[in-house]
Image (tube, grey):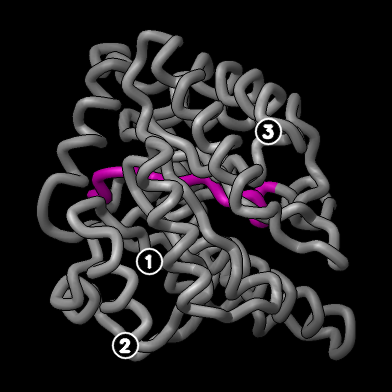
Amino acid sequence: MADTRISTADKRRNFHRLHEAGCFAIPNPWDAGSARYLQRLGFKALATTSSGFAWSQARHDGGMSRDEVLEHLTELVNATDLPVNADFESGYAPRAAGVAESVRLAVATGIAGLSIEDSTGNPKQPLYDLTDSVERLRAARKAIDDSGGDALLVGRAECFLVGRPDLEETIARLRAYASAGADCLYAPGIRTREQIAAVVAAVAPKPVNLLLSWASEFTMHDVAALGVRRVSVGGALARSAWGGFMRAAQSLAEKGVFTGFADAASGQELNDLFKT
């Protein structure tokens, strides 16, 4: 169990402080065990991954129900003393009132923050129009405020992930989300120094989350110099774990060999980790 001396209020307070200055990594566990290990490594906060959790349940990204995600959030919050930011996809509702209800339920799990996307899941109209997107963010903001808590709200512009890599549109959306009450802004899919610097400058002084989910040449020092406040990795850690598992399993199935276990973690090390 997590250390009960760390209250939800303390976690949220610590999370807000992390966003005030500097640059921190916020890696994405997909279950209680991976969350506990990341805490052991010294990270200061964690974020869930919709894709990593879905794959662990034999589902596609976006294939989990709201109730399943809420249960998952509760599990991760209880597994760690660190603040947990929820990848809350599009709020599990198309309308602002539904987003507000979903956010209210998410805040009740004890999360320290959550993100709301502007993607619809409909390939023909991949993004909510800006008016609807802003209304949905405002509803999320009000739900957090009405809860009496201070969970941090992240506004996400999904343009680059849904086939509309328009930096001007992305920035316009992020600015609108900042005005609607988002505490932190996020444009997953931007990759170049120029794109990152432009987003940081456009929403300043609000903090920016950068997604680095590939084998990037960037270091934490590099992105800090660009003004990024926090760096998440999405499903990359889960994909890395799946990659090791798949290679070892394929070697056994196709070649009848056990060499794929060469880089396996020590059972003793894992037992020691989860005894504490």
Which residue lies under the disc numbered 2?
Answer: 194
**What amino acid type is highlighted by mark number 3?**
Val
Q: Mark 2 or mark 3, which has the lower sequence index? A: 3
Badge nearest the viewer, 1 or 2: 2
Q: What element carries label 2?
A: helix
Based on the displayed image, in which of its 4 quarters is residue 216 positioned?
Answer: bottom left
In the image, farthest residue toward the front: 131
Q: Is mark 3 on a helix, strand or loop?
A: helix
Disc 3 residue crowd, few under 14, some 14–19, many 20+, Cα 10 Å: many
Say the numbered circle drawn on residue 69.
3
The range drawn in magenta is: 42-53
Q: How many numbered badges does the structure rendering display? A: 3
- Mark 1 and mark 3 lie on one chain; the one further toward the N terminus is 3
Foreground of the two, 225 or 99: 99
Residue hosting label 1: 210
Task: State the residue at coordinates (71%, 24%).
Answer: 98
The reply to whether discs 1 and 2 touch (Cβ–Cβ < 8 Å) is: no
Residue at 47 percent of width and 65 percent of height: 187
